[in-house]
Amino acid sequence: MGQVPDCTSFPTVDALHAELDALAAAYPALARTRTIGTSRRGDPLRLLTIGDGPANALVIGGPHPNEPIGFRTITALADLLCRDAELREGLGLKWHFVACADPDGARLNEGWYGHPGDRRAYARHFYRPDLDRQVEWTFPLVTDDYRFDRPLPETTALMRLMDEITPSLVCSLHNGEHQGVFYYLNRDNAALARDLGELAALQGLPGHHGEPEMPGSRLIAPCVYSTFTGAAVGPAFGAGAGSADYAAQFDALHLVAEVPMWTDARVADQSPAGIGHRALAQEAAVKRREVFTVLAAALDAVADDLTVQSPFRHTTEGTLRTLRTHAAQAETFAVSDRPATVAEEFDQRQGVHLVRLRLLGTCLRMLDAEIAAGNPAPAIHTQHELLTRHFDRWVAEAENETAGMRLEIRKPIAVQLAAILLAAQTATHTK
């Protein structure tokens, strides 16, 4: 973890590919790159392979394009494996890195990659496809009464790669905004879960003690949840299975490492917040419904005037449906009237900011595209002005509540890197 270099930004897709090519050129006997597929818009999907161990590990970076910490985790780990023969040989793995699983989506986020500490820039240049167009959640899924068979080209490339290498380990690298460190693990391995749960503190990062990302998630150990299946996600959101579901056919250990991009000590504060848990949940629900109403009204107002086939319309409409469904699920779980913790209060309120700024930022980009194309429709311009006022107000509220926000990218990178190595050690010793 101590060998992870410091950094203050994230690379563009082209810069990331150049780094991988440079590493392969520096270690030609160990590392090689190849193309395993093509994105929807024609970008090559690049694979870096290192070593020649008897078992195979696959590490997936950027399955959600607004989550680029994994880009840096992969370049740091790949460099470490090339430099450290003892580590590489001791793990006994051939490593396969797909550093950017969604290059199309990543290019639409590059407007904030250079200054990730700027919350306004992050939200205003934000892009994340809805679940049915996410690399992570478009693996084939068949249940008794639901079928999803529309894998993206990027997802299909990952499926072919897994079929080829039959992995013992698959790691999917994710990051959030303000939550603490947490993981999803597809095995109830108590020792690995305990070790994973201790990594955050080694870097001075908080573990996640707020609300679970998915309502009803089961804890294996503090900050380590049991992986939820595609059958629990896909039918509810119109999506497919996850990479963990596909990896299961190879009996692979699957790890999702979730780390924060921004840190705040409140996310792990277990002291009383001075508000009841039920009242806190109800307050957040009211604020979420407010933004849903604002956005739905804007979409209705411009529906007949949209002319540009941009990716932002689908994701705005789809994400609104998804977040409404997720909010409704959360509200069906019984909430006790016990005192809420500071961590739960912080997490609930940051969740409101996340919903507001992601939805409005993406919708404004949809309207930007219309205005740039010369669309003169009054509704387009009126809604752009109205949503900009909401956006400015909600950005100010978010920034006011997180005045102590810190950006220390090296630390979550180090945690992800260590989590991968712990999982690798477990996979090769228990397979």
Image: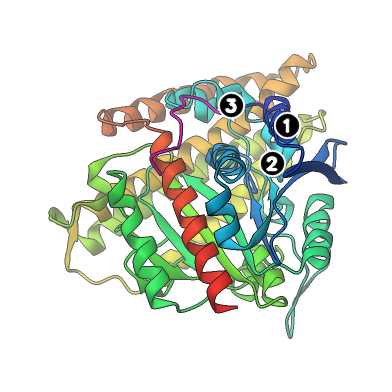
Q: Are marks 2 and 1 in contact (CB under 8 Å)?
A: yes
Label 3 SS: loop
Label 1 SS: helix
Measured in 3D between alpha carbons, the distance from the residue under mark 3 to the one under mark 1, in whole angstroms, is 22 Å
Seen in the image, is 53 located left or right of residue 335? Answer: right
User: What residue sits right under mark 3 in the picture?
Assistant: 125
Using the image, determine if residue 379 lies above or below residue 95.
above
User: Quick one: label 3 or label 1, which is nearer the N terminus?
Assistant: 1
Measured in 3D between alpha carbons, the distance from the residue under mark 2 to the one under mark 1, in whole angstroms, is 9 Å
Q: Position of residue 399 (x, y in %)?
A: 33, 28
User: What residue sits right under mark 2 in the picture?
Assistant: 100
User: Quick one: label 2 or label 1, which is nearer the N terminus?
Assistant: 1
Using the image, determine if residue 87 lies above or below residue 196.
above
Q: Position of residue 92 (x, y in %)?
A: 62, 63
Tell me which corner region of the image, top left, top right, bottom left or bottom right, holds residue 390: top left
Residue type at the position of mark 1 = His
User: What residue sits right under mark 1 in the picture?
Assistant: 17
Crowd class of label 1 (few under 14; some 14 to 19; many from 20; radius 10 Å): many
Q: Quadrant of the N terminus?
A: top left
Label 2 SS: loop
Q: Quadrant of the C terminus?
A: bottom right
State which region is magenta.
Answer: 1-10
The secondary structure that most of the magenta stretch takes on is: loop
Crowd class of label 2 (few under 14; some 14 to 19; many from 20; radius 10 Å): many
